[in-house]
Image (cartoon, rainbow, N blue to C red):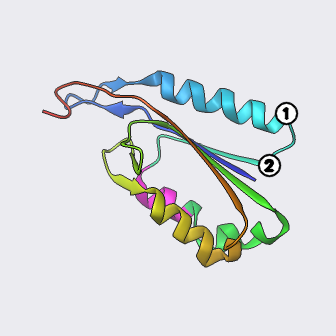
Amino acid sequence: IAFVWGNCYQDFKGRMSLMVAVDSAMMVAETLQHVGFEVRPRMNMRKRFIMDELSDDNLRDLGKYDTVLVYFSGRGDGSSFYTQSAETVTIQEVWDRFDAAGFRGKARVLIMDLFEMKSSWEE
């Protein structure tokens, strides 16, 4: 199974930027689907929706998979990534949710396609 997340972001004036992150994520999702992965793509999600996506109810069927792949495209620092609203989601939070859903000890693949942005958003 593959979870593919792409996040552009909004600057302080509400303008969207980094749309290439969403485009990249959609291309990766399509490619993974073509090679046989069940893909759960989500774009421009807030942290609470990512955590909901990783809830026990939504991950209940993971037992049938031997590998989980997580792809993220957007802003981040290598140990975490940022949602569209600049909320931080750590990789450890993501792995902890998989562990809680019974995926402990199974193969995990993490791909982070990170972009550095310099704008008034961060100033």
The quarter holding residue 54 reads: bottom right
Circle 2: is it few (<14), some (14-19), or many (20+) Cα within 10 Å? some
Image check: 116 left or right of 109? left
Q: Is residue 34 above or below residue 53?
A: above
Residue at image coords 76%, 53%: 1
Q: Residue furthest left?
A: 123
Q: Where in the figure is residue 61, as x and y percent of width and height?
A: 78, 69
**Of 114 and 120, which appears nearest the observer?**
114
Q: Is residue 57 above or below residue 78?
A: below
**Element on which disc 2 rests:** loop
**Of 117 and 59, which appears nearest the observer?**
117
Q: Where in the figure is residue 86, as x and y percent of width and height?
A: 30, 45
**Of 93 and 27, which appears nearest the observer?**
93
Residue at image coords 52%, 62%: 94
Residue type beneath disc 2? Glu
Q: Is residue 85 above or below residue 26?
A: below
- Number of marks in picture: 2
Residue at image coords 50%, 56%: 50
Q: Where in the figure is residue 36, as x and y percent of width and height?
A: 87, 42
Tell me if label 2 and label 1 are in contact, CB under 8 Å.
Answer: no
Q: Main secondary structure of the magenta part?
A: helix
* 49 in magenta: yes
**Element on which disc 1 rests:** helix
Label 2 and label 1: CA atoms lie apart by 9 Å
* 73 in magenta: no
Image check: 32 left or right of 35? left
Residue type beneath disc 1? His
Q: Is residue 85 above or below residue 58?
A: above
Quadrant placement of the C terminus: top left
> Pointer 2: what residue?
38
> Pointer 1: what residue?
34
Q: Which residues are magenta?
A: 46-52
